Amino acid sequence: MKKAVVFAALIGLMATPALAEDGAALYASKTCAACHGADGKKTLMPNYPKIAGQNAAYLEAQMADIKSGKRNNGQTAAMKGVMHLVDDAQIKVLADYISKMAP
């Protein structure tokens, strides 16, 4: 009986959101700030988008489309070079984090 309780507790811990990656840490480690600014508002180049406060679903779709190549134009070249380092779960975390940045 004790083994079943311990096993159930371990499964519960593995599924908790507390183990999810931190959006701020991902934003820094995936070098998002280099082009979009630490606050998502001060971009490196005038044609780079200000992303702070953008809709999470939109951000997620844009990152996924750039990663897959579905969105592929001159504006996506810098992002394409980074997106292969970001998995789908991290895209969701980043989109949520960026959407909550003050616009």
Image: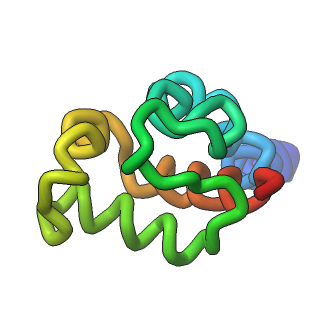
Q: How is the image coloured?
A: rainbow
User: How many numbered badges does the structure rendering display?
Assistant: 0
Q: Quadrant of residue 85?
A: top left
Dividing the image into 4 quarters, which one contains the C terminus?
A: bottom right
Q: Nearer the viewer, residue 98 or 49?
A: 49
Task: Give residue 15's position: percent from left, percent from top.
Answer: 69, 54
Which residue is pictured at 37% across the width and 47% down the height? Answer: 87
Task: Give residue 90's position: percent from left, percent from top.
Answer: 50, 48
Left or right, residue 89 beside residue 79:
right
Q: Quadrant of residue 66?
A: bottom left
| Residue 84, above or below 5 | above
| Residue 95, above or below 7 | below
Which residue is pictured at 40% across the width and 56% down the height? Answer: 88
| Residue 38, above or below 60 | above
| Residue 65, above or below 37 | below
Q: Quadrant of residue 68?
A: bottom left
Which residue is pictured at 29% across the width and 43% down the height? Answer: 79
Left or right, residue 23 beside residue 45:
right
Task: Give residue 44's position: percent from left, percent from top.
Answer: 46, 31
Task: Give residue 91's position: percent from left, percent from top.
Answer: 47, 54
Left or right, residue 98 beside residue 61:
right
